[in-house]
Amino acid sequence: MADSQYEAPEDPQNEQPLISHLVELRNRTVRAAISVLVVFVVLSPFMKQIFDFLSHPLMVALPQGAKLLSTGVVAPFMVPLKVTLFLSFVIALPMVLYQIWAYIAPALYRREKRLAMPILVSSVGMFFLGMVYCYFIVFRMVFQFIAGFSPDSVNFAPDIDAYFSFVLSMFLAFGLTFEVPIVVVVLNHLGIASYEKLCKARPFVIVGAFVLAALFTPPDVLSQLLLAVPLVILFQAGIVLVRIFGKRQEEIDSMPKDDEDEE
């Protein structure tokens, strides 16, 4: 009875797996942060030039001699710094994603590991492509469209902080939009969506594309079309890839369970 009043001491070895996972997570996070910091240190002497390059599509649309405004005391320093930090993260994104992959890879099944590296590479490439499309096509058309509707009595000169927030949200929106074909292919290979189901979902995706475009772009028709139309086209491109390389419904139904595929 006396022994039953006392609990057995905890075995330190039972806590070791959790501690080791936390240590590895910390190490991976530190490496990812260092990669961003190294790129930032290299780019920091060129903060002015980087911001000028980012603001070029808007400057072309502004009236002759007009410039962006700075309503904050430290904004002329902080905004170029944030732009440079964002660019550093984008450039270091492959290293950041690799650290995430290295951390979660031991917990993946064999089939998932075969998909992970191609998905990682293509995701980075498509995200960059979305940002390029946004910078060279969307910004140029949208800013000229907005400036053309500005009354002569209005001085169209946006604040640099507001401009950076707008650019960041647009980059993220278009970068994620260009991930749609990869998401479609992944859903198919994981057995979640067959070619037939994707075709049936096409009308709902078209409606959802315009809803998302209305939420994440300025309230003008041109911006919404420039986001919604590529989203629909990219979804259709994903369906074409699934039709060529993907799995039909009968193949998905015959796929082995995860416990049978585990190493």
Image (spheres, helix red, strand yellow):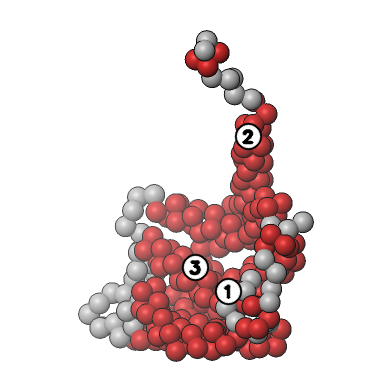
Asked if residue 142 shows in the view, the reply is no
Residue occupied by mark 3: 172
Q: How far apart are marks 1 and 2 (CA)?
A: 34 Å
Q: Which of marks 1 and 2 is in front?
A: 1
Q: Which of marks 3 and 2 is in front?
A: 2
Indicate which disc residue 113 carries. none
Q: Tell which circle, 1 or 3, labels the residue nearer the N-terminal end.
A: 3
Which one is nearer the viewer's eye here, 138 or 129?
Answer: 129
Q: How far apart are marks 3 and 2 (CA)?
A: 34 Å
Residue occupied by mark 1: 192
Amino acid on which disc 1 is placed: Ile
Q: In which quarter of the image is the C terminus?
A: bottom right
Amino acid on which disc 3 is placed: Leu
Q: Residue at x 45, y 52 (%)?
A: 77
Indicate which disc residue 19 carries. 2
- In the rendered image, the residue lying farthest to the front is 1
- The 10 Å Cα crowd at callout 3, few under 14, some 14 to 19, many 20 or more, is some
- In the rendered image, the residue lying farthest to the top is 2
